[in-house]
């Protein structure tokens, strides 16, 4: 068997090559094929929104900026909305140097999640304590690197927490065209994020209200000893989306991912995170609104829908009753005793007895659509009013009682007459006797 030698040498060759095979890198599986991974915009089981994919490009390379130090997880997944963004950071003495460094890291991480540039997001920083210092204006830096370097050079100021003065300064000197803010025609949102760990030492309620009225969207981030009531007075509505609180500066950096989601322009209608009950309409730049299917109206929560109450509109034309249907339409019905006509709107009398206005004490008998008569239960008889009823035995008893009463009266009258006649006869006998005595006397004279 001369050909068996190579076959015998093959196992030995595999033994020699086996260590080299172990060193070869295994091919990375397709991320879409991994269990539990869903594509962007798809919906999970039972309609649950699809999860946002990790920051991995289709070819397996990291997404743009994903490898930069300090970059928030998931960065590069979406394009941020263009903003005029101003940070107002509290650097009073209560903020220790290491804590102030954490604040600057927080600001830098948010910058990492944004698209920075003259046509994209512009960033300014206002530093405040008992005084206010504009560290740099919106037009000062147009790239992330120089922005983060400028943030890194910021130093604390002094004692005091003049939050109201900081907001006023941002309104008057930062959100202006001269400082680099874009005008109303650009439709670029004006956003301010104020970070503080104490209670403001000036009035913030009125100045914050003026800032919001001028079109500035205010986010309030409280740390440690921050006064929650003051945060709510400063922030825009809804408060649950504009007020944040962390217990220590050590965890403030985690809020950067929250702001990334807030400023992200990813279409929630595509993601399936919109919570619209019926229809999600994308408005662009990450904004959307909900609408309802035909026959439904949007509720006050701007998410859910209810069937339109067409009956309440007063245009239904029903003569008697309007009934809403689940489909958002309606139909007409009639009161008891009436029937719906062919026009499905008006009603005609079907049974006057059913109207309940007949007045019969016992039974109403319909004689047609327009007439009726009353009847009584067995053992009763209809009275002369043709409405009420009396028991037959009772009627007999009443008649019998009347007869007895009549007989007694007659007997009493008869006895009275008889007694009178007897008395009259007695008197007449006396008179006759006297007449006879007189007559006898005259004869014998």
Image (cartoon, grey):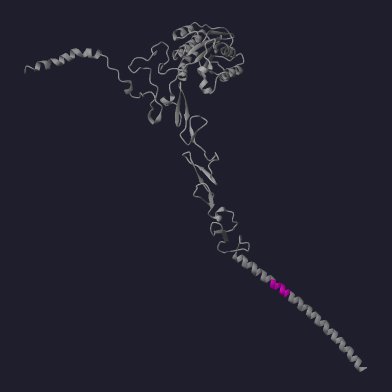
Q: Is residue 111 above or below residue 239?
A: above
* Camera-side residue of 439 and 309: 309
Q: Is residue 369 above or below residue 200?
A: below
- Secondary structure that dominates the magenta span: helix
Which residue is most to the bottom?
444
Magenta-drawn stretch contains 409: yes
**Could you tell me how many numbered marks the image carries?**
0
* Camera-side residue of 129 and 311: 311
Residue 70 placement, left or right of 406: left
Which residues are drawn in magenta? 406-412
Magenta-drawn stretch contains 121: no
Q: Position of residue 306 (x, y in %)?
A: 49, 35
Residue 53 placement, left or right of 411: left
Q: Quadrant of the C terminus?
A: bottom right
Q: Position of residue 298 (x, y in %)?
A: 50, 32
Residue 266 placement, left or right of 360: left
Q: Position of residue 367 (x, y in %)?
A: 54, 60
**Image point (79%, 78%), residue name:** 420
Residue 364 placement, left or right of 265: right
Which residue is most to the right?
445
**Image point (55%, 16%), residue name:** 226
In this rendering, does residue 281 appear at all? yes
Q: Position of residue 184 (x, y in %)?
A: 53, 17
Q: Quadrant of the N terminus?
A: top left
In this rendering, does residue 223 appear at all? no
Picture quarter containing residue 112? top left
């Amino acid at each position: 068997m001369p050909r068996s030698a190579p076959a015998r040498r093959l196992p030995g060759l595999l033994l020699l090559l086996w260590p080299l095979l172990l060193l070869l890198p295994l091919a990375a599986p397709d991320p879409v094929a991994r269990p539990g991974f869903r594509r962007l915009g798809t919906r999970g089981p039972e309609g649950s929104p699809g999860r946002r994919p990790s920051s991995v490009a289709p070819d397996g390379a990291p997404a743009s900026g994903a490898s930069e130090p300090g970059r928030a997880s998931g960065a590069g997944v979406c394009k941020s909305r263009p903003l005029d963004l101003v940070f107002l950071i509290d650097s009073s003495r209560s903020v220790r140097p290491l804590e102030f460094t954490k604040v600057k890291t927080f600001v830098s991480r948010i910058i990492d999640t944004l698209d920075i540039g003259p046509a994209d997001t512009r960033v300014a920083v206002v530093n405040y304590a008992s005084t206010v210092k504009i560290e740099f204006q919106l037009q000062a830096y147009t790239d992330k690197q120089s922005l983060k370097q400028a943030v890194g050079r910021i130093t604390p100021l002094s004692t005091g927490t003049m939050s109201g003065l900081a907001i006023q300064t941002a309104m008057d000197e930062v959100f202006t065209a001269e400082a680099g803010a874009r005008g109303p025609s650009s439709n670029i949102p004006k956003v301010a994020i104020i970070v503080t760990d104490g209670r403001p030492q000036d009035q913030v309620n009125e100045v914050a209200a003026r800032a919001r009225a001028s079109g500035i969207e205010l986010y309030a981030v409280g740390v440690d000893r921050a006064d929650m009531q003051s945060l709510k007075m400063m922030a825009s509505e809804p408060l649950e989306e504009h007020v944040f609180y962390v217990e220590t500066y050590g965890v403030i950096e985690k809020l950067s991912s929250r702001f990334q989601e807030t400023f992200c322009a990813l279409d929630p209608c595509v993601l399936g995170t919109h919570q619209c009950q019926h229809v999600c309409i994308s408005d662009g730049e990450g904004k959307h609104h909900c609408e309802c299917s035909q026959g439904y109206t949007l509720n006050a929560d701007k998410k859910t829908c209810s069937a339109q109450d067409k009956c309440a509109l007063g245009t239904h034309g029903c003569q008697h009753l309007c009934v809403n249907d689940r489909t958002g339409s309606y139909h007409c019905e009639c009161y008891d005793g009436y029937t719906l006509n062919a026009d499905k709107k008006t009603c005609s009398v079907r049974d006057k007895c059913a109207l309940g206005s007949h007045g019969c004490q016992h039974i109403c008998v319909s004689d047609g659509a327009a007439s009726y008569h009353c009847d009584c239960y067995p053992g009763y008889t209809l009275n002369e009013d043709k409405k009420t009823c009396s028991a037959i035995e009772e009627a007999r008893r009443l008649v019998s009682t009347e007869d007895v009463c009549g007989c007694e009266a007659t007997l009493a009258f008869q006895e009275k007459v008889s007694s009178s006649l007897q008395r009259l006869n007695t008197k007449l006998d006396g008179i006759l006797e006297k007449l006879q005595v007189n007559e006898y006397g005259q004869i014998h004279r």
